[in-house]
Image: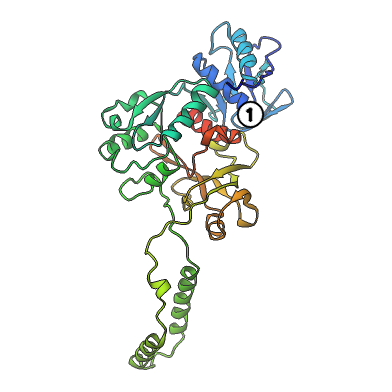
């Protein structure tokens, strides 16, 4: 069995009188948060950066207030620092030199999330296994397994987070959909991965105001431009032109145009070619809580046909979008037409509903627990979602 890497945390040197701070942006900080939540400590997170004691703490940084927690808080956090590898900094002042104050309404209480993972058909067993391994083994955080066919009868109010691994849930969740929607509006966080996100965009589901795109063909945009050009040309004609003569002329032109068999037999709706496997770059909206801990971009693994249209600003946020085509492909292989179409499309979308959230990934960020650099994107959804 592979041995876990040794972690060297930075424990608080002295007991704090005001709070303990954990700078956000490392997997070690996320392990520390998971441990604090397991221990039922009261933890807060700052939605904006702040400077205290001459040091800057990025957005997402954790604040563990002394007065809100048990008397042995220092000993508990010392042990958590050693086990997680995180840096935990004591502070004896609440004076913030710059940024959000420790008592601001932009400092969010992070309730301990109760997490459910859907499993059984149609959920991909691989996707289920990857997310369980990440949460239970790598971050030692407990989860509840919930059979897809049991969701309709389940009391979803027991859970704060519901994760739908990759899979097509249209028929499997049809009877449960009203209760899932009501649960989200009441404050639940729904996280969908890969093909589960495609299902959210289907007609009648109405939880993600995006769509999975069909294949783009070279003639599509040109024909649109041609139509607009025809409108401009016709508007410039003299009003007394013989419309019947113009119509006859257009008809004669259509009859002489050769029949294009290749174009005629193309399906009306066809998915883009599947990317066999590539690492692509995405740009991140670092002001959104889902991207806390990142500097502005990340590298993601792509291995599907999924290309999602970016969401409109009045519906939600495109937290991660693929980079422009000329600097997007970092490794692996994908097709030229896919590169052109997927550039600047959505990888990670957040759409609020009532008090709750839909967090939708175009791909599975937990693939084989391979992309450690994406852990925070997923864990931000799990731990920060219920606090927002």
- Residue, far front: 1
**Front one among 127 and 78:** 127
Q: Is residue 388 visible?
A: no
Tell me if 336 is positioned left or right of 148 in this view: right
Q: From this view, report whether residue 248 is shown above or below residue 41.
A: below
- Residue 49 at x, y = what percent? 64, 32
- Residue 368 at x, y = what percent? 53, 34
* Quadrant location of the N terminus in the rendered image: top right
Which residue is disc 1 drawn over? 26
Looking at the image, which residue is at 45% across and 60% down? 215
Looking at the image, which residue is at 54% across and 8% down? 70
Tell me if 150 is positioned left or right of 305 in this view: left
**Front one among 59 and 229:** 229
Q: State the image quarter where residue 184 is shown.
A: top left
Q: Can residue 29 be seen in this view?
A: yes
- Residue, far top: 71
Q: From this view, report whether residue 267 is shown above or below residue 87.
A: below
How many numbered markers are drawn?
Answer: 1
Looking at the image, which residue is at 60% across and 14% down? 80
Looking at the image, which residue is at 55% across and 57% down? 335
- Residue, far right: 54
- Residue 19 at x, y = what percent? 62, 16
Label 1, residues with CA under 10 Å away: few <14, some 14-19, many ≥20: some
- Residue 77 at x, y = what percent? 61, 13
């Amino acid at each position: 069995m592979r041995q876990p890497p040794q972690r060297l945390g930075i424990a608080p040197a002295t007991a704090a009188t005001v709070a303990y701070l954990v700078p956000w942006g490392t997997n070690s900080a996320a392990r520390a948060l998971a441990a604090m939540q397991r221990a039922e400590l009261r933890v807060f997170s700052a939605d904006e950066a702040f400077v205290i004691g001459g040091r800057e703490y990025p957005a997402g940084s954790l604040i563990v207030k002394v007065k809100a927690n048990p008397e042995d808080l220092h000993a508990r956090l010392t042990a958590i620092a050693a086990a997680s590898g995180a840096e935990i900094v004591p502070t004896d002042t609440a004076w913030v030199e710059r940024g959000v104050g420790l008592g601001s309404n932009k400092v969010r209480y992070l309730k301990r999330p109760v997490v459910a993972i859907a499993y059984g058909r149609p959920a991909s067993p691989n996707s289920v296994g990857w997310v369980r391994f990440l949460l239970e083994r790598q971050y030692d955080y407990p989860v509840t397994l919930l059979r897809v066919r049991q969701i309709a009868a389940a009391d979803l109010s027991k859970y704060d987070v519901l994760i739908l691994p990759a899979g097509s849930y249209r028929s499997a969740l049809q009877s449960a959909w009203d209760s899932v929607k009501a649960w989200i509006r009441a404050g639940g966080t729904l996280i969908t991965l890969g093909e589960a996100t495609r299902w959210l965009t289907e007609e009648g589901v109405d939880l993600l105001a995006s769509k999975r795109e069909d294949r783009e063909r070279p003639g599509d945009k040109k024909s649109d431009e041609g139509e607009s050009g025809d409108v401009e040309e016709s508007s410039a004609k003299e009003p007394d032109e013989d419309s019947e003569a113009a119509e006859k002329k257009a008809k004669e032109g259509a009859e002489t145009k050769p029949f294009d068999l290749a174009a005629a037999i193309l399906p009306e709706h066809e998915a883009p070619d599947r990317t066999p496997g590539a690492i692509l770059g995405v740009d991140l909206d670092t002001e959104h809580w889902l991207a806390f801990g990142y500097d502005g971009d990340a590298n993601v693994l792509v291995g599907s046909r999924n290309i999602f249209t970016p969401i409109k600003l009045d519906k939600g946020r495109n937290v991660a979008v693929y980079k422009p085509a000329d600097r997007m492909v970092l490794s692996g292989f994908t097709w030229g037409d896919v590169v052109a179409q997927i550039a600047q499309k959505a990888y990670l979308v957040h759409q609020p509903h009532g008090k709750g959230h839909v967090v939708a990934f175009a791909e599975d960020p937990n693939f084989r627990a391979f992309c450690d650099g994406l852990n925070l994107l997923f864990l931000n959804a799990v731990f920060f979602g219920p606090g927002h």
